[in-house]
Amino acid sequence: MSRLVSIAFLALTVFYGPAPAHAMSIEPMLLEISSSGRTTQQSFKVVNDGPAPLPIEIQVSKFDLGLDGEQKLVKVADGVMVYPVQAMIPPGASQVFRVQWIGDPAISKSESYKLSVLQVPVKPSKGESGIQIVMSFGVTVNVSPPQGTSDLVITQAAPVTGKDGKRVASVTLKNPGNKHAYLRNATLSLTGNGWSAQLSAGEIAQKIGLGIVQPGKERRFLLPIEVPGAVSAIQASVKLQPEGR
């Protein structure tokens, strides 16, 4: 499963019913939608990899990301429409869910949504007891104005001590545009006291994930780069690849 910011997986233990645990997979887990034009609608597919029917329900939440990637979720009733919102997927089969923007076609900046794909617990038969494992996945939907632009600029860079006690690089980036940007589409270069390091877009995607930076906001990332003790200050630069590459 991909390491995506705002894309989550949760296994919930429900203490009723001995129904077997199901397995499901989702593709894709990231959707790009325009608020107007030809790409106001996308879709994703849920596959039931388990041996029993899989009851699914979709819940829509809008989210904002904090400086360190923390999510603030707000349930919404409009903007993004999903069809169907519920489905029973037979074993070995799949269900396609359509996602469409029905909100303001002239939004001023990108908006981010999370589609919670929830396995609905099966009510146990009378007299049954046991443990049932249910699953929840998250699909990220970014809605942007068709002529929106994004950029990344570095506002701060410094060596910090990580949770494992190692010195790593902390970089804070701001997106001055009106469309979301992805750190995974950028290259980072770091220098300091004769030391230098670089993270390619591929390395960032693999080690950090998407790295969503919403329009007008800042995100702070701890980079998987060890910084020598002699380096007390870091100079950093970022190069965002043009979209479509």
Image (cartoon, rainbow, N blue to C red):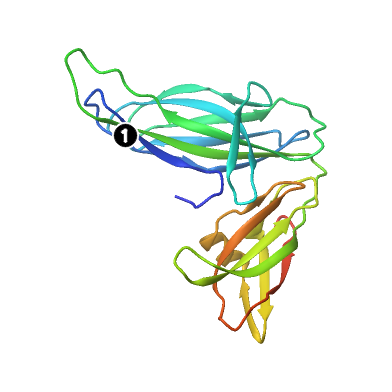
Drawn side of residue 226 relative to residue 1, left or right? right
Judge whether 133 appears above or below 174 on screen.
above
- What residue is shown at x 50% (from left), y 52% (from top)? 3
Residue 177 in view here: yes
**Three-letter residue code for mark 1:** His
Q: Quadrant of the C terminus?
A: bottom right
Percent position of residue 116, x then y: 51, 32
Drawn side of residue 100 relative to residue 11, left or right? right
- Using the rendered view, name the quadrant where residue 105 is placed: top right
- Using the rendered view, name the quadrant where residue 39 is placed: top right
- What residue is shown at x 61% (from left), y 59% (from top)? 221
Percent position of residue 134, x then y: 35, 32
Residue nearest the viewer, comparing 78 with 84: 78
Q: Residue furthest top?
A: 126
Percent position of residue 27, x then y: 50, 42
Drawn side of residue 52 relative to residue 211, left or right? left
Percent position of residue 52, x then y: 29, 29
Label 1 residue SS: loop
- What residue is shown at x 68% (from left), y 63% (from top)? 186
Residue nearest the viewer, comparing 161 with 133: 161
Residue 240 in view here: no
- What residue is shown at x 16% (from left), y 14% (from top)? 127
Q: Residue furthest bottom?
A: 194
Judge whether 204 appears above or below 144 on screen.
below
Residue nearest the viewer, comparing 228 with 119: 228
Judge whether 228 appears above or below 154 on screen.
below
Judge whether 69 appears above or below 98 on screen.
below
Residue nearest the viewer, comparing 30 with 43: 30
Crowd tier of the residue under label 1, counting other residues whose Cα lies within 10 Å: few below 14, some 14–19, many 20 or above: some
How many marks on residues? 1
**Residue that mark 1 sits on:** 22
